[in-house]
Image (spheres, grey):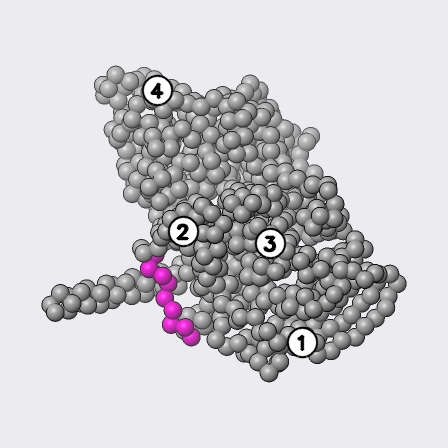
């Protein structure tokens, strides 16, 4: 009996402690997140608390859809079925809300027929549900003939898509489940026991269309394709995952909550992450999703698993290269992560990609290509529509003949090595330190790869970014009181120099920043999604000259990255970015409005890594400010929960030569302390978000402490500043003031 009482007491204590932790988490979220009135209303009505994140396993990379969190790996199609049901349940709980079962009583309430030249059109109203009070309007368009025709099902916004489909021999069904015409709003009151969201109700509406189409002899119910663009692209994926009768799905530019996983397209990548989408569109997805802002690694599922739940049925993921609602890199990660499920179910070719140039909108040619793909999948044509992924992989680098390093050639390194010579003796002179710096730089070069021959370029306007490209990327017109000069520099790279208008026409020289953006695929140095003014403009308003350019694989340079490792197998994407950054310094040093002795680098995310490397290798850089994106590699193991160094060589092959050090992290030739030490005694400020699952804060503190010994030895103990913010990993408007503060630059 005493044992039972003790067990009950321990359960009570544990539960009380857990509730206290969860309440603290909610208080933290309310403090650090922008206010969302809709979310606050839901919190008050539901009394719900965030999950106890300590009890949820952290998965910094995309979860393996064939490996349940608490079970054996799925290895057969029979084992996939129950796991698929589990995934659907998790999506309903965390992302899309619960849905009612099929009503089973769909019937036609109204029907009007129209004969048009070359097509037959019907306007139909369905009714179903409790007392048949739910209604859904749809339009049927079919070509001449008895059929049965394959079906092109889409939302009202895309009626003109349907017209093209009819011309291609499809029966088209257009239903009122979109912003322009939406019949699903009243359904909330008809099924009050379900917490389904707007997009999920619209997805459920598509299934009611399928119910009806199955009764029409002209419709081939075995070949029903559901299509949608943007938020309707998200709807289409949800519908296809919930309803296995949908034979194929085309998700066009569905972005965050669609084909872009939350872990790959958060605010840390200048994407429409969880915070932005749940605040700006609070009725699209479940409010419970907002708990995971900044803690995407704790989300038990991710979007690639929603797509995996559609397998083995064909799925086309279509995206525009410069669409700010999505990311080419994120979608390719999504496809690769979901692919094993399609392969397991015998359909390895049924998850496809299609790219188009330009921004968010589509054109007739895009819809024709969607129908080309459907014709292939439905057996109406033999011409394949092959994928053409853009971002290189580690395998691409290996096939190109990239030369790996041998970890055994490098000793395991510990703390305290910085101020020791190669023989282990203390460094006592500047000459010995210079020799040490040279040796560290050689190690850095080994990892960055072999830099090809590069010649200096003074920069100029020939080859600068054309106005239409600048307009596409939202940087064609500078704001009031700012000047923008577009330049070509280095190896024919384009960049923009911003400075205040009151400097133009004078001989004044300003301190300058080179702005190094994070992974920001769609718009490069201009954030696709952001709050407040973008960093490069805010810095300029504070009285600096700011030079910004798109890193390779981002913005205007997306397609340039496709064959990089075929062209430069022994270099690296980070090495190229560092070279471009140093070329930017070349240009700034000769500009009439830039003080050549005050050129600083500031970077965020991957840009922070590039800034540290460039400053470590280039003594002309006067100082560095970096935000996020930094964790010491020797502590970035698979078990650390930060993602491991494999994220720099595999998920994003910035440094493919790091791949061989997975499991041998202590032998990585250099790390954050060495980078910081090479910059000393120049000023360095590290601004690290307090909530960032990709950063090991304690390891970073140790790295800063080690590097400070070098700063102190060189007489600048205060030049290395380490600052933790009370926020999650994103570039907030408040961070700009940290960059612009006078205490940053001595």
Q: Nearer the viewer, mark 1 or mark 4?
A: 1
Residue 118 placement (x, y as % from top left)? 87, 61
**Secondary structure state at the residue bearing disc 3:** loop
Residue 715 placement (x, y as % from top left)? 29, 29
Res 742 → quadrant? top left
**Secondary structure state at the residue bearing disc 2:** loop
Check residue 48 for magenta coloring: yes
Q: Quadrant of the C terminus?
A: top left
Tags 2 and 4 in contact by the CB under 8 Å rule? no
Measure how far apart labels 2 and 1 are at the Cα level.
Answer: 40 Å
Q: Which region is colored magenta?
A: 45-53
- Please rate how many residues cluster around mark 3, counting C-alpha atoms within 10 Å: few if below 14, some from 14 to 19, many from 20: many
Q: Residue at x 49, y 72 (%)?
A: 194
Q: Nearer the viewer, residue 698 or 466?
A: 698
Measure how far apart labels 4 and 3 are at the Cα level.
Answer: 47 Å
Q: Earlier in the sequence, mark 1 or mark 3?
A: 1
From the viewer's perspective, tell me whether residue 424 is left or right of residue 735. left
Measure how far apart labels 2 and 4 are at the Cα level.
Answer: 38 Å
Measure how far apart labels 3 and 2 are at the Cα level.
Answer: 26 Å
Q: Residue at x 42, y 30 (%)?
A: 658
| Residue at mark 2 | 68
Residue 703 placement (x, y as % from top left)? 31, 36
Measure how far apart labels 1 and 3 are at the Cα level.
Answer: 31 Å
From the viewer's perspective, tell me whether residue 66 is left or right of residue 318. left
Judge whether residue 45 can be spotted in this image: yes
Q: Earlier in the sequence, mark 1 or mark 4?
A: 1
Q: Specify the farthest residue to the left.
A: 2
| Residue at mark 4 | 409
């Amino acid at each position: 009996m005493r044992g039972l009482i003790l067990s009950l007491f321990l359960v009570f204590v544990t539960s009380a402690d857990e509730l206290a932790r969860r309440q603290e988490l909610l208080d933290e979220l309310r403090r650090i997140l922008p206010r969302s009135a809709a979310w606050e209303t839901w919190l008050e009505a539901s009394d719900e608390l965030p999950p106890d994140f300590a009890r949820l396993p952290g998965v910094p990379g995309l979860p393996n859809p064939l490996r349940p969190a608490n079970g054996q790996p799925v290895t057969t199609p029979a084992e996939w079925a129950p796991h698929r049901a589990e995934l659907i349940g998790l999506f309903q709980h965390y992302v899309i809300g619960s849905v009612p079962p099929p009503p089973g009583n769909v019937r036609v309430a109204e029907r009007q027929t129209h004969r048009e030249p070359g097509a037959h059109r019907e306007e139909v109203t369905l009714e179903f549900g409790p007392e048949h009070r739910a209604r859904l309007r749809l339009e049927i368009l079919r070509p001449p003939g008895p059929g049965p025709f394959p079906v092109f099902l889409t939302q009202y916004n895309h009626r003109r898509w349907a017209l093209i489909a009819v011309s291609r021999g499809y029966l088209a069904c257009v239903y009122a489940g979109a912003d322009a015409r939406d019949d699903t709003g009243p359904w909330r009151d008809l099924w009050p026991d379900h917490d389904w969201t707007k997009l999920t109700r619209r997805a459920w509406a598509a299934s009611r269309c399928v119910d009806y189409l199955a009764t029409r002899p002209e419709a081939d119910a075995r070949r029903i394709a559901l299509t949608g663009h943007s938020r309707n692209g998200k709807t289409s994926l949800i519908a296809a995952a919930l309803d296995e009768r949908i034979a194929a799905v085309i998700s066009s530019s569905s972005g965050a909550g669609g084909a872009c996983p939350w872990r790959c397209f958060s605010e840390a990548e200048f994407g429409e992450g969880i915070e932005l989408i749940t605040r700006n569109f609070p009725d699209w997805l479940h409010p419970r999703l907002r708990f995971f802002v900044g803690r995407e690694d704790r989300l038990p599922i991710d979007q690639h698993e929603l797509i995996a739940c559609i397998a083995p049925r064909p799925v086309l993921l279509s995206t525009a290269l410069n669409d700010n609602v999505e990311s080419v890199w994120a979608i390719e990660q999504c496809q690769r992560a979901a692919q094993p499920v399609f392969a397991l179910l015998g359909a390895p070719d049924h998850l496809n990609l299609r790219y188009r140039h330009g921004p968010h909108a589509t054109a007739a040619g895009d819809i024709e290509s969607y129908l080309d793909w459907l014709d292939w999948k439905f057996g109406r044509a033999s011409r394949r529509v092959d994928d053409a992924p853009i971002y290189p992989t580690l395998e691409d680098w290996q096939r190109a003949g990239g030369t790996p390093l041998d970890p055994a050639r490098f000793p395991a390194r510990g703390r305290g090595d910085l101020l020791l010579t190669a023989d282990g003796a203390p460094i006592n002179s500047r000459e010995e330190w210079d020799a040490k710096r040279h040796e560290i730089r050689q190690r850095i070069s080994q990892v960055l790869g072999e830099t090809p021959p590069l010649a200096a370029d003074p920069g100029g306007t020939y080859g600068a970014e054309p106005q239409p490209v600048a307009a596409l990327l939202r940087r064609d017109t500078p704001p009031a009181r700012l000047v923008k000069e577009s330049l070509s520099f280095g190896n024919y790279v384009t960049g923009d120099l911003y400075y205040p208008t009151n400097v133009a026409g004078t001989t004044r020289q300003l301190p300058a920043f080179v702005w190094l953006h994070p992974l920001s695929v769609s718009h490069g140095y201009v954030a696709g999604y952001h709050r407040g003014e973008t960093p490069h403009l805010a810095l300029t308003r504070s009285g600096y000259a700011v030079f910004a350019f798109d890193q390779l694989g981002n913005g205007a340079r997306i397609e340039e990255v496709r064959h990089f490792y075929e062209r430069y197998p022994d270099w690296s994407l980070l090495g190229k970015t560092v070279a471009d950054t140093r070329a930017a310094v070349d240009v700034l040093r000769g500009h009439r409005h830039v003080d050549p002795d005050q050129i600083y680098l500031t970077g965020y995310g991957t840009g922070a890594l590039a800034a540290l490397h460039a400053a470590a290798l280039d003594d002309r850089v006067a100082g560095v400010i970096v935000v996020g994106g930094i964790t010491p590699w020797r502590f970035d193991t698979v078990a650390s929960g930060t993602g491991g160094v494999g994220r720099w060589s595999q998920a994003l092959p910035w440094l493919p030569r790091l791949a061989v050090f997975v499991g041998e992290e202590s032998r990585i030739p250099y790390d954050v302390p060495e980078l910081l030490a090479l910059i000393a005694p120049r000023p360095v400020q590290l601004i690290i978000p307090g909530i960032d699952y990709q950063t090991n804060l304690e390891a970073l503190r140790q790295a800063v402490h080690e590097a400070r010994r070098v700063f102190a030895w060189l007489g600048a103990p205060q030049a290395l500043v380490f600052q933790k913010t009370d926020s999650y990993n994103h570039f907030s408007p408040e961070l700009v003031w940290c960059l612009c503060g006078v205490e940053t630059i001595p």
